[in-house]
Amino acid sequence: MSDRTSPASDNLPLPLSTRERGPETSPHPDPLPEGKGIVDAGGGRLYPDQFIHNVAAALAGAAGEQTEVAWRRDRKGVLTGWCRLPSGVALLPAARAVAELQGRLAMVTAYLPERAQEKGEREIAYHFDLDGATLTLTVILPLEWSRVPSLTPIFRNCDWQERELMELYDVQVVGHPDPRRLFLDHSLPHAPFERLVPYSTFTNAATSKALWDKVMAGAREDA
Amino acid sequence: MSTKIIELGSHQLALEEPMYFRVQLEGDRVADLDVMPGQVHRGMEHLVMRRNLYQNITLLERLCSLCSNSHPSTFCAAVEDVAGIAIPERAEYLRAVADEIKRIASHLFCCAVQANVIGETTLFRRVMEIREIMQRAKEAIYGNRMDLAANVIGGVRYDLDADSAAYLAGRMEEMKKPLDELYLQYENNPAIMARTAGVGVLTREAAREWAVVGPVARACGIDYDVRKKSPYGAYDRLEFEVALQTAGDVRARNLVRLAEARQSVSLIEQCLDGLPAGPLCADTLPEIPAGEAIAKSEAPRGELMYYLRTDGSDFPVRLKWRVPSYMNWDALKVMLKGEPVANIPLIVNSIDPCIACTDR
């Protein structure tokens, strides 16, 4: 237990900023010892309350005092945190706060929630890994003219996630460095997840010769 | 120096699935890379929203052949989390057995393909022969060489009786010596080292920046394995070390895979020794309520993540997954930079790329 209450955590002021945290520090204020020390009697992983407190403080500092994270701990002790952001404006500061906590962007899920049309709302969930714990920041956007800032300047691997999101849903990602289509063929309509598109059109199944011809044709257009 | 752009397809990249690269060359060295995925986009995320949760188990098993057990088991874990279902302990162990069998076969396949790419056909044949022990074990126990159909919501749909457990234990014994021998080959054989050491290097800093996972990350010294960081199923009761290397090159990635394959043998033996008695599946399943959940697992290529959102019906509102290959592709820009054209197929195969998983 002594490792978890090491004095290192005492001189860590809140809110966090990059100047105060080195680039290689753990998201835990007091890095947990590897091996047996991180497993409790029930076999679950222990996260110090300080960790939960730090994430809450960083997000509240970045995205407003009313920002709350609801944590769920599963049977193995693994934490998942859920935080809803009221608007796209809060996303960028919140993402920066997660980056300062050494979070890794794990996945981005855009979706039309249940009764989306009725409520006129859509959601995008940004899932971050914090050394084994998963923090999901969900931003609620209007159904029409949805815009979110690009997180690619903060998390390089957000590039593909956002390119995929932009082609499947009617969302504009502002400031993406390379907003080309990623997976979908140009013959498909924009945002097929929000339109009725026949499955065979959607998948655009073709032979390898046809694929190769298409790639070569694309190369000629670029030249 | 001349600058030139070339297109490479699956034949030139030595891939069995279609993926196209647009490579910018400076002389005969790679300067930049554009990956063009989506050539076999199957619209799987579109389909899963039009299938009920049970049908999706079958559909997701067909997402990828090499990690075919990771997809349904992680999806089931997400459904179980939403519904608060605790799976029986025996099922946790049997899910781990299925995952580890697939891991050995997947890692060996990757190492075999790379041996073939560098012209070591004898080694290629040897690795595939060793892998065949696992293929036959899968066929004997699950009735299929690739898709195991091992998972259901609430548990598993296969059992190991005394005979099949003894058979599997025998196969594990048979794997040990060849796996140790292969590790030494990939570690020390001068012909292999000449082609793999110092080739396709990804530094630890770049690995963090590109957020790569799995053996690609562990070969750069990043100590991250979902089985340790976010334990699930039986892994909190099984002993193993996270396989780590520091060089970040093609050789290091293969050594991580071979060390993991050897550890998977030990994990399967631990599961067989400690297999708890009891049911295979929860007896009665509750209705799946409205909710959302994240489930993660360590697939052969690294962290696999599922997000499930439900509305109380048996169709998902959204089911999204992110495969480990997803980030590894873009990191090829770093691994290939400055490499001669001739090394491209080897380096591409060293990330153990999965196109079926990426395109979906």
Image (cartoon, grey):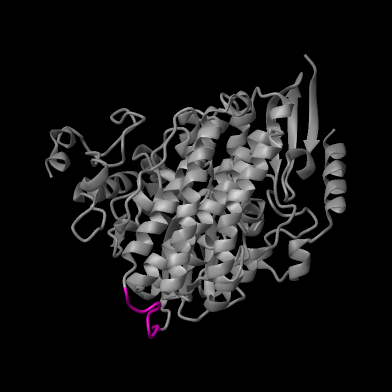
Q: Where is residue B126 in the image (x, y as percent from the top left)?
A: 63, 44
Give the side of residue B60 with respect to residue A82, left or right.
right
* B279 drawn magenta: yes
Predominant secondary structure, magenta span: loop
At x 63%, y 65%, the residue is B62
Farthest residue to the top: give it. B1
Q: Where B271 sits versus A34, above or below? A: below
> For the C terminus of chain A, which image quadrant?
top right
Farthest residue to the bottom: give it. B284
Q: Give the range drawn in magenta.
A: B277-286
Q: Where is residue A141 in the image (x, y as percent from the top left)?
A: 50, 59
At x 71%, y 52%, the residue is B38
Is residue A51 visible from the viewing direction of this image?
yes
Q: Where B145 sits versus B352, above or below? A: below
Front position in the image: A163 or B37: B37
Q: Where A90 sits versus B143, above or below? A: above
Q: Where B142 sits versus A5, above or below? A: below
Q: Where is residue B345 in the image (x, y as percent from the top left)?
A: 70, 36
* B278 drawn magenta: yes
Give the side of residue A194 with respect to residue B286, left or right.
right
Quarter residue B186 falls in: top right
At x 26%, y 58%, the residue is A44
Front position in the image: B341 or B308: B341
How many numbered marks, from 0 up?
0
Q: Where is residue B335 in the image (x, y as percent from the top left)?
A: 60, 30
Front position in the image: A79 or B190: B190
Quarter residue B9 falls in: top right
Is residue B298 visible from the viewing direction of this image?
no
> For the N terminus of chain A, which image quadrant?
top left
